Image (tube, rainbow, N blue to C red):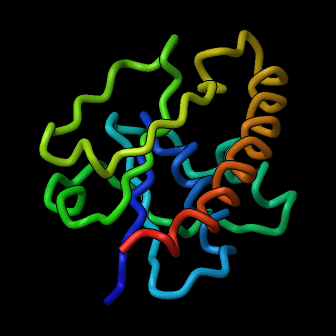
Amino acid sequence: MNKTVYFLSSSQQRSLMAEGWAEKLKVSDWSFKSAGWVADSRSREEFSVLAMKELCIDISSFPLSRIEMKELGEASVIVAIQDTEYDDKMELPSEIEEKVIYWNLPNPRKRSATLIEEWVHYQEICDEIAMRVKDLEHLLPQLH
């Protein structure tokens, strides 16, 4: 049976990065999906895409999507990526709370005053997300 990790972030950029890293994991029977809880009208050529391309991970073709409650209910694990200081609070149904892992990670867009700062923040968050996703590699096989 295939199990799913559903990555969520406000505009989906950080969750796309997590999905890209997760695709590199060596875990069988797991699939990965990402979504955002706020509509994102920006183009796909974001700093998140460029930061991942620097590491030879192409997330440019990953679909941009909003949270689907049905898919959340079917997910085995939900990783909610949120900047608790700057992002609007994400409201998740209480019946799925037991399968949610919260990652408090900076939102590069909201923490940057200039484009250069935003680019640097995306590079930093890319590394942080990589480390957290790598930790999932050890956790996922233990979940049933």
Q: Quadrant of residue 107?
A: top right
Lateral position of residue 75 relative to residue 11, left or right? left
Where's residue 118, x and y in %?
A: 74, 25
Relative depth, front residue between 69 and 54: 69
From this view, report whether residue 82 is shown above or below residue 130.
above
From this view, report whether residue 25 is shown above or below residue 134.
below
Where's residue 136, x and y in %?
A: 59, 60
Q: Residue furthest front?
A: 142
From this view, report whether residue 94 is shown above or below residue 54.
above
Q: How many marks?
A: 0
Q: Residue at x 83, y 68 (%)?
A: 56
Q: Quadrant of residue 134?
A: bottom right
Q: Quadrant of the C terminus?
A: bottom left
Lateral position of residue 99 relative to residue 83, left or right? left
Where's residue 84, x and y in %?
A: 48, 18
Where's residue 78, x and y in %?
A: 37, 52
Q: Quadrant of the N terminus?
A: bottom left
Relative depth, front residue between 95 and 14: 95
Q: Residue at x 81, y 39 (%)?
A: 123
Q: Residue at x 18, y 59 (%)?
A: 73
Q: Residue at x 24, y 42 (%)?
A: 97
Lateral position of residue 136 relative to residue 73, left or right? right
Q: Quadrant of residue 76?
A: bottom left
